[in-house]
Image (cartoon, rainbow, N blue to C red):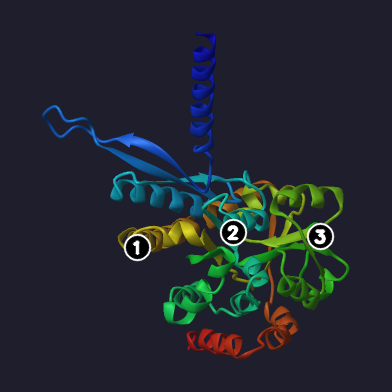
Amino acid sequence: MRKKTLTLLITLLLAIVAVVGCGGSDQSADKTNEKPQTGGTEAPATVKTKELKLAFNQPENHPQYKAMEQLSKKFAEQTNNEYEIKIFPNELLGSQRETIELVQSGTIAMSIVAGSLMENFNQDYAVFNLPYVYDSREHQMSVLNDQEIVGDLFRSTESQGMFVLGTFHSGTRNVYTKKPVLSPADLKGLKIRVMESDTNIKMMAAMGGTGTPMGQGEVYTAIQSGVLDGGENNELIYSNLKHVEVAPHFTYTQHLMIPDYLITNSDVFNMMSAEHQALFMQLFQEAVDYAIELWVVDVETAKAAAEAAGGIFHTVDIKVFQDEVLPLHDEKVVGDTAKALYEKVRQAAK
């Protein structure tokens, strides 16, 4: 009798281990949702909901967060809850560089990352991150929404575990510092936070300062403590992350219009049905347009809030900064592919 009882206990233990072993987490954790009964005595049908984790380094009031939140809701509704995109804002899942690695490994499904970081995986991305390469927001988005221009580049990192699905406009980047900057000479000796890319470091050197790569979440404290003398970004970041409190002078250098990319784990997107892929891309384009609408309004709101907090906005002659950085175009645009991309970008401005 004791032997039979022991056998039953072992069998039960193995069953529990098997169940736990099958429940490991990945970038698209499954949930089970019940559909309403359609009548009769039939049991309700069930559908597996795949949870897609999306990393984001900005707060919930950011236009891109709001746009992706809307996309998530529509995508769930139109796929009968087959997918749920869960957004993790405020660098909860790590810095942008770290989340790219998480996407590659399949730990999370997606992330929104600055365009400059993609240079680390394909140097041709540098063409879209050059200072003063775009004449306007409309010029930028006409290029980055044109699949004939960007299609091959966006898919070029697929074998590395991730690729770019599309592009958000992320404003115009400008310098902000503890003291006024009205010319390249005023940047001399100043340590300015830049995104992690060789192009940005060299750009800041050409503009007169010293580019210092650093995660966004560390910038406030670094300026406050004197590790940095300032940063460079758009009005939303400047105001929403309270950088105005430690660097009250915001100078409209307008040196960069770097895109933000939505990247995905290669397997996650490729395993979707063709119908769901097409639906996602349609909804993403709607999200891009919606984010731009919000951006225009939010920039004015952010600027007013920064001024109320003591921020001073300086308008300068950007040509003096353009002249300093334009040689970087020749240095960075190397190879036939990059040269062809650069030519297409500039042709689109005409």
Label 1: element kind: helix
Residue type at numbered disc 3: Lys
Residue type at numbered disc 2: Gln
Quadrant location of residue 236? Answer: bottom right
Judging depth in this view, the residue of 140 and 188 nearest the camera is: 140
User: Which residue is identified by label 3?
Assistant: 179
User: Which residue is identified by label 1?
Assistant: 282
Label 2: element kind: helix
* Pointer 2 or 1: first along the chain: 2
Left or right of 41, for residue 198: right
Judging depth in this view, the residue of 307 and 151 nearest the camera is: 151
Residue farthest to the left?
Answer: 40
Residue drawn at the location 51% of the way across and 12% of the way down: 5
Which mark is drawn over residue 216? none
User: Which residue is identified by label 2?
Assistant: 104
Position above or below: 43 against 282: above
Residue drawn at the location 53% of the way across and 61% of the way down: 263
Q: Is residue 303 visible?
A: no
